[in-house]
Amino acid sequence: QARHRWHFPPLVTFRHHPIIPTPAPIIHATMKLSLALLAATLSGTDAFTATNNNGPRTVTELNARQPIMAGNWKMNPTTEADALNLATGFTALLDEMTDSCAMEEKEGCTEVVLFPPFPFISKVRDIVGKSGISVGAQQVYYEDKGAFTGSVAASMVKSVGCEYVLCGHSERRSVFSDSDANINMKVKKVLEVGMKPILCVGETQDEYDLGITQEVCAMQVSKDLAGVSKKDMAKVVIAYEPVWAIGTGLVCDSEAANDVHKYIRTVLTKMYDEEVAQATRIQYGGSVTPDSVDALMAKSDVDGCLVGGASLFADKFARIVSFEKE
């Protein structure tokens, strides 16, 4: 299929920071703590058994869970002019892609969300909102107001047009020491003010090497969604982001990602029920590219992608959003 493409010069460049290994004693202590917490919160060995049906997504599954593609710009680009240029180029390119149903309000079509830095949110929304694209905030604080210098309240970002908020992104967890307790309060605050959280979970390289991916994801999901009602789960999106694949160029194999997504649904079944587990949209995040998106989106339990670096290039992100359904 022919695709209309615009090619833009790189707007930004950035350096990826190396992952600092965690000392072995801390890793093993974390693993023991994870297992203990899971034993207390999830009963039954079947909660740890993921099925292996990695077949193509059916029309029913695709329509039941609307695909959602999100672009997390992180601390990029460096100027407002570049941010508006990126937003303008992206929306214009999608409008030219006649074979894409992105942003159309019908079953099976893709929901698109952009997460610009705080200073650019309003003007980016003015540009992309005309094309049906939503905007979100990369993070909020759980207090409503007060002496919290440098923090932003959920009500503030809602007032400038945000519909979504990222909660628990690995960079907030590692660089800014965002704890599960704080993430849980943020998730509930986002829901309280009428927005939708995208809860990010995932294992580090060390945890992956130890073979405790499922335990880590179960612990984070269980803690971060504590106290969230079944009704409010209709507004929650989960993003599985293996930390070792974020910004490294490494991509989790699509079948392995699908298995983790299926496992997360077993955790949701234990916490809520099968209805919630099957209705919740789960994105994959971690160096998603135009070359990897089709295989990921062909999987039965991958409902979208949370895209970092590639979302800073209009043509790359437009291709990701307009993934080819297999």
Image (tube, rainbow, N blue to C red):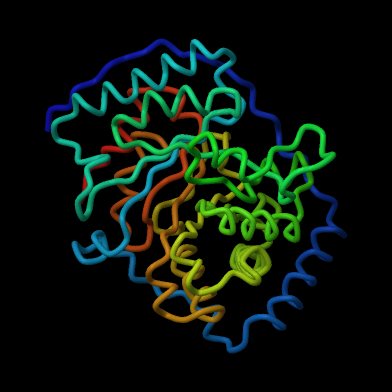
Looking at the image, the residue that sits furthest to the bottom is 44
Relative height, residue 325 to residue 230 (above, below): above
Relative height, residue 146 to residue 108 (above, below): above
Going by the image, does 238 lie left or right of 100?
A: right
- Identify the image quadrant of residue 179: bottom right
- Identify the image quadrant of residue 91: top left
Going by the image, does 255 lie left or right of 15?
A: left
Q: Residue at x 31, y 37 (%)?
A: 132
Q: Residue at x 64, y 70 (%)?
A: 222
| Residue 21, position as x, y percentages in the image | 78, 45
Going by the image, does 310 lie left or right of 176?
A: left
| Residue 198, position as x, y percentages in the image | 52, 52
Q: Residue at x 26, y 38 (%)?
A: 322
The quadrant in which the N terminus is found is: top left
Q: How many marks?
A: 0
- Identify the image quadrant of residue 208: bottom right
| Residue 63, position as x, y percentages in the image | 24, 60
Q: Nearer the viewer, residue 170 or 183?
A: 183
Going by the image, does 298 lie left or right of 192?
A: left
| Residue 284, position as x, y percentages in the image | 46, 50
Q: Residue at x 65, y 63 (%)?
A: 224
